[in-house]
Structures are given as C-alpha cells and as structure tokens.
Image (cartoon, helix red, strand yellow):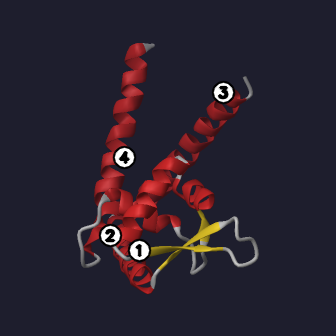
Amino acid sequence: MEDKLNQYFNSLRNFSNLFIHKLITSGSEADCELKLSQMKALSSFKNDQPFLMKELAQNCGVKLSNMTIMIDNLIEEGFAERKRDESDRRKVLVNLTPKGKNLRARFLESRRKTATSIFSKLSEEDKNDLMGSLDRVCAILEKAIASDESH
C-alpha cells in the first residue's frame, strides 16, 4: 500500500509541477513578479464584484486563515481593499482595486495565451484523452472524499 501511495503522490506532484509552473506561473508575465499565493488570490476573484473572505477561500480552495494572509499581501501591494458591507456592517467585503483588476486581467490573459499555445500542440485524440482522464480523476477523488466525509 505504501508503494502505491508514493506513486500517487509522485504522479500528483508531477502533474502539479507541470500545471502550476507552465500554466499558472506563466501569468506572472503580467508586468511584475507575483508570488504563487498572489496569483492564486487574484484567480479567486470572479467578475468585478466584492467577496467575503469565506467566499474567496472557497474559490481558491484554501483555509480562511491562509486566504487572509494572501489578501493581506494583495492589500499591502495596493491590489485589493477591504470595505464594510453597507447593508450589513458586520460583513467585511474584499474587492480588487483598479490596479488589482488591471493586474488580474493581464495575468488571466497571459495564462490563457499559454494554455492556448500548449493545447494547440495536442492532437484531438490527446485533448479528448486528457479531458477524459481529468474527469475520471475528479470523479474518483470526489467519491473517495464523499466516502471519507460520511464516516
């Protein structure tokens, strides 16, 4: 069992390295050196709306405490800001500043160009195999997680 588990970890690490280093970090060409955590934080914002910290953490797939640190870094750099919700003063919303929105747009565009370049080199069969494999991996992991959570 231990050998199989190590194989899984190695495969996930290899996939993660390929994905993160080629697709995600390529977005750092967006005019400045961004830390991986800042790129993830920028990616957690959807559209032009403000979010609660809890929502950003869910979008990013990280713990709330980690998201708070990531947002603090964006605020320090002038990319994000916190504001009280006008309808419920207990809630604190986080929004990107114009500088942050501009950086996010450039980052996402750069990431899209890199992904397009990579996927344009794949045959239709490879694209279908990749999508099918990713769908199967997600389904298997969702089943395992659901089983684990029900215990």
- Quarter holding the C terminus is top right
Left or right of residue 93: residue 69? left
**Mark 3, other Cα within 10 Å: few <14 / some 14–19 / many ≥20:** few
Query: Disc 2 versus disc 1: distance between alpha carbons?
Result: 6 Å
Circles 1 and 3: CB distance less than 8 Å?
Answer: no
Q: Are marks 2 and 1 in contact (CB under 8 Å)?
A: yes
The residue under label 3 is: 148
Dot 1 or dot 4: first in sequence order is 4
Asked if one can make out residue 123 in the rendered structure from this viewpoint, the answer is no
Q: Which residue is mark 1?
A: 108
Q: From the image, state whether disc 4 or disc 3 is nearer to you.
A: 3
Compare residues 140 and 73 and report the one nearer the observer. Answer: 73
Which secondary structure lies at badge 4?
A: helix
Residue occupying image coordinates x 46% and y 49%: 66
Q: CA distance from mark 4 to mark 3?
A: 23 Å
Q: CA distance from mark 1 to mark 4?
A: 18 Å
- Please say if 8 is above or below 92: above
> What amino acid does circle 3 point to?
Asp
The image shows residue 61 at horizontal and vertical percentages of 53, 51
Residue for badge 4: 16
The amino acid pointed to by label 4 is Ser
